[in-house]
Amino acid sequence: MTWGSASEFFAMGGYGLYVWGSFGLIALCMAADALTAIKRHRDARAAHPEPGENS
Amino acid sequence: MLADTRFFTFASPPRFYALAGRLIPWLWAATALLAIAGLYVGFFQAPTDATQGDAYRIIFIHVPAAWMSMLLYMVMAFWAAIGWAFNARLAAMVARAIAPTGAMFTFAALWSGALWGKPTWGTWWVWDARLTSELILLFLYLGYMALVNAIDDTRRADQAGALLAVIGSVNVPIIYFSVKWWNTLHQGATISATTAPKMVATMLTAMLLMTLACWAYAFAVVFTRTRAVIAERERDAKWLNGAVPS
């Protein structure tokens, strides 16, 4: 195991801002990309709802 | 259904729509498992780098994102060209569905590169060949998206987009070979087909797991967006309304 404690883990040997700044913002961007795609599909299906459709 | 499955079976938007809908939950499950495994190996198994300290761990998202940015562009240009050449509806829709995800990965590569460059090179950005050509890739994605959205006639928009995508694909080998062709601050290729990997096995494992996670993610999101485009373009078709669960 590389890390002695949780605070050591989050400090990333002094590079915490760079490492978590990379992973954090990219995780947000990936989530936003996925959610906009899901919403776009949902909106397209909702535009012409058919009775009995299980959307 | 399997009895009449042929090579072009899933080029039919209704068939593809149904198939993609079934695959998407599994793709998300694969994304989650691979990302958890990759992050675990990357942050808890891989050792601290002797020269870069823990800043090097940015590689576990930087390299997969950069690979995806180039790969998705080539896939987008390929399907756009197929859609244009053969008037294949689904191919043109897939090309459009790829662009936002490709742009997102390009931004991710640039962003993580800047945050990696600051502590190791001492600068967020330099106008060298690798970084500049990757920035041009981002503009190509954004230009493609703006172009296809600016033209109201769907087929004309797809054709104009295909032309831009195909011409722009010349940039991808320039990105890839930029570190060989020019002197740049950026290091050479991380993984090469001709030489043994120069990294610790755990580092390589983490990077490959994260790459597979990005692949699964890209399939999941692109399939979802392709289904959205199909639903938008075929919203009056009978098959969509009632026949297929969303």
Image (tube, coloured by chain):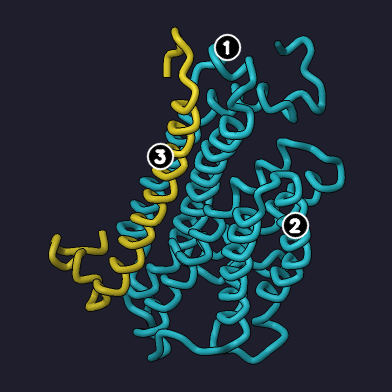
Q: Return the x and y of residue B207 as percentages of the image width and height.
A: 48, 58
Residue nearest the viewer, comparing B177 with B152: B152
The amino acid type of the residue labelled 1 equals Ala
The residue sitting at 27% across, 76% down in the picture is: A15
Residue, disc 2:
B160
The quarter of the image holding the N terminus of chain B is top right
State which mark lies toward you, 3 or 2: 2
- Tell me, by letter, which chain the rendering colours cyan: B
Residue, disc 1:
B243
Task: Specify whether B200 is left or right of B234.
Answer: left
Q: Circle 2 — which element?
A: helix
Mark 1, Cα crowd under 10 Å, few <14 / some 14-19 / many 20+, is few
Q: Return the x and y of residue B149 as percentages of the image width and height.
A: 60, 53
The residue sitting at 67% across, 22% down in the picture is: B15
Q: Circle 3 — which element?
A: helix
Q: Return the x and y of residue A41 as percentages of the image width and height.
A: 48, 34
The amino acid type of the residue labelled 3 equals Leu
Residue, disc 3:
B33
Task: Specify whether A47 is left or right of B181.
Answer: left
State which mark lies toward you, 1 or 3: 1
